[in-house]
Every structure is written in structure tokens, then in C-alpha cells.
Image (cartoon, rainbow, N blue to C red):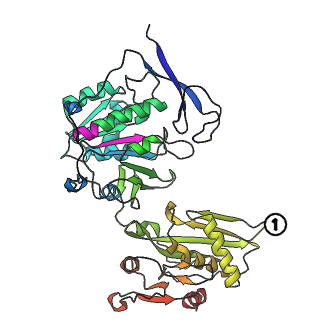
Amino acid sequence: MAKLKTTFFCQNCGAQSPQWVGKCNSCNEWNTYAEEVVEKTGTKKVPFSSSKDKRVVKPQRLTEIKPQKENRIALNDQELNRVLGGGLVPGSLVLFGGEPGIGKSTLLLQLAVSQPQLKVLYVSGEESEQQISMRADRLGKANDNCFILTETSTQNIFLQIETLQPDLLIIDSIQTLQSPTIESSPGSISQIRECTAELLKYAKETNTPVFLIGHITKEGALAGPKVLEHMVDTVLHFEGDRNHFYRLLRSVKNRFGSTNELGIYEMSGKGLREVDNPSEILISGNNENLSGISIASTLEGVRPILVEVQALVSTAAYGTPQRSSTGFDLRRLNMLLAVLEKRCGFKLGAKDVFLNIAGGMRVDDPAIDLAVVCAVMSSNADIAIPNNICLAAEVGLSGEIRPVNRLEQRISEAEKLGFEKIIIAKSKTKLAHDKHKIEIIETGKIEEVVRAIFG
């Protein structure tokens, strides 16, 4: 009988130890080590091998290496193209994570059936062919170049890949795969690491892009060892509340583009629809003037977006006033409330303050500060801000209004959506007021903003 080789792995960070320890020295978590079978001696097989394995790689001078232009694959999904940095890079390994039921499998199946120019292999270890077919029928799309394989063994998967020679490979999910070189169960630290390494080798040697769907933990992080995120080229997170229609696609890591881009989708019965103009969905169409609502111009990557900031200020019913924020940093909200009380004389110490960014978005752009301050002042005085005014400026600790970057894009977006005025900070850079039809109001202190809005 072959001897089993076992070792202990931390289920939180993937650290390895020859014996069980109570506290992990890498992530300082307790009771996370579990014993896993690594391999049986004399039974190691190589699922994927290439004739290039025997090539001899010689060092080259950096000055002799000629940079080549990336030939990206243009996908029929403009939101995903933008988040990836302008298209899919051949040979790239993309990790796609998100909560259960958020729409990961739906989005990638939708991508697979909407690429008639590519031969796509969709490998599922979680669903049967009938389930995938029913979902494709619900999407209302068909593609003869899309192939479905329900398999969990990497050895069998690579046999089918060698026969089919796909242009794009989608794995749903990496936690269900099992390599014959490792004897531990699927989803374990060693299995995830080994399966990802085999797929990475395949992607780089054949120049085939690979999408991996990954599970997440209850804390919201990608399940598996942290080295998994280091191995892949791109890490995408699919976010959103299952009680809302909108889903946000963010790039956490991208070796071929910016990590500041954002893709927005709308979930419907026929799949995920791309949202071309997110500002329209993030601003309510309510024409009534309500207090505590302001419109802010923010940026997600290079994309200007207008969001609705909602604030509610009320007398505290208990001794300690509440401070609650959804979609905005609570510490920054407390800082802005302190500025209002110290510099502007607003007595908010005994009042509850609730803040919400409409549409389920989370914003960390400093340009939203002025909109937060104005929404709080509007709710406190119960005076509505005119719905034709937009705001874009940072608020300093001394109560001054500070300029933000890419003002031209913010102003153009507000003008496109029909706003008549935009309040910004004074800056040394002169803006071309005649170039825009919207009225640009430059301010230096919060008092000037109050006069411009409330008169």
C-alpha cells in the first residue's frame, strides 16, 4: 500500500506546517490548521503537459527586449471590457468572486453564449447540463460555438481541452475542481492551489484566457489561500444587494489595466443588462423638493457618475445620539459633522444623523464631502435643496471648500443630465465658463455655499 503524505494547512491564509499548531504565525488566527493529504508516493501524474516544457530559456538584456502591443479580445460586454482595461488579454487568468446568488454564473454564461466569434468551453462542477441549458434558455441566447462540460477532475478537463482547443475557458468554480496529483478533498487549500497552478500553466503556454469563478468567505474575502490572488492576473468582485436590481463589478487587481474602473449591471428575468448611463439610475426621478437630498458628482475610475446623497437629522430619543452611514465612510461623516459644529455653529451633538448613498453604491471620493454637508444642513433646517443644483468639492477641517480633480468631466456629466448649476471650489486653474451652458459657482467657504443654495 502506498504511503500517504500529509501536512497541515491554515484554512484562513494557506500557511503550511508539518504539525498542528493552535495559532497561525502568518495570520494570527486560532484553530485554523487542518490536516490534508498531499499525495501518495509513486502515483504523481501530470494533467497538463506541453512540448514547450523542454525548451531552454536564456536570460536577455532588458534593452534587447522589444515591447509588443497587447492584442486584446473585444468582448460583447462593454462593462466587462472597461473593467478589464479595454478587453480580454490572451493568456490571462481572471478570478471572479462574489456572494452566493449574486449572479456570477449568470454573467459568465451570458458572456459565453454571446461570443459567436470565439469557441468557448464552459466547465461546471456545480450544475448539470440540463440546469445550464435551462439558464441559457432563460437568457434567450444560443450559440453553436459554446460547449458545456460538467466535470471536476482536471485530468479529464484537460483531455477535453486538448480535443476541443477552445479560445476561451470558463471554470465554475475553482473550489469544485480536483487534481489527481493531490489526494485531499475538493475545496481544500492544497487542491485550490494545485488546480489554479495547472490552469495558470495552461493559460500561459497556450495563450488562452481563462475565467475562474471563486467562492467567498462569510467575511467577504475570496475563499482559499491568499496566494490564489497573487497567482492570477486579474481579480474581479461582483457586488450588490440581492434585494436590489443593480450589481457592481469592481476590479481589485489588474495587471493589464486600472483597478479604479466600475461596471454596473441590472438584474432582470432575462439575465444581466449593461447600464450605459448609471447616473440616471442613481438619481431618483422625484420632482418634488424634499429636504435632506443633494446630488454629488463623483468619479469611478475615469467614469463620471452623479449620485444622490440622502441625510436625515432628528432629535436623539435616547441619551447617546446615533451616527449611521450606508455607502459612505462613517469616520469621515463624523469628521464633517464636527466641522459643521465647530466652524459653522450647527448644534448637531444631541441629534441623530443618518446618511445613505442611493442605489446601493459605496463612494470614497472626497468630492462628495460638500454634498454630504449640504444634505445634513438641509435635513436639519428642513429646507429643500433645489433639484437643479449639483455639488463637487472637498471640505477641509477648517471649513474651507477644496478643489477636486477632473472637474471638466464632472461638469460635463452634470450638464448632460440637465442640471442648471454646479457648485465647486475656487482654484488657481481657470475654467472655461463659456464652454459650458451650466452655471458654474465657485466658492471658498461653507458660508458661501449656504448663501448660494438657500439664499
Above or below 345: residue 242: above
Could one spot residue 126 in this view of the protein?
Answer: no
Give the image location of residue 348, x and y in percent: 72, 76
* 309 relative position to 263: left or right: right
Question: Bounds of the magenta span?
Answer: 202-221
Give the image location of residue 257, x and y in percent: 33, 58
Asked where in the image residue 260 lies, by quadrant, the reply is: bottom left
Q: Residue furthest right?
A: 319
Q: Residue at x 23, y 48 (%)?
A: 60
Q: Residue at x 48, y 53 (%)?
A: 240
Above or below 401: residue 199: above
Would residue 204 be counted in the magenta stretch?
yes
Above or below 104: residue 186: above
Total marks drawn? Answer: 1
Give the image location of residue 266, x and y in percent: 40, 56
Could one spot residue 210 in this view of the protein?
Answer: yes
**242 or 16: nearer the eye?**
16
* 60 relative position to 415: left or right: left
**436 or 11: nearer the eye?**
11
* 344 relative position to 275: left or right: right
Give the image location of residue 256, x and y in percent: 32, 55
Would residue 39 be counted in the magenta stretch?
no
Q: Residue at x 42, y 45 (%)?
A: 230
Q: Which amino acid, by three-letter code, is at mark 1?
A: Gly
| Number of other residues with Cα within 10 Å of mark 1, as a class: few under 14, some 14 to 19, many 20 or more | few
Residue position for label 1: 319
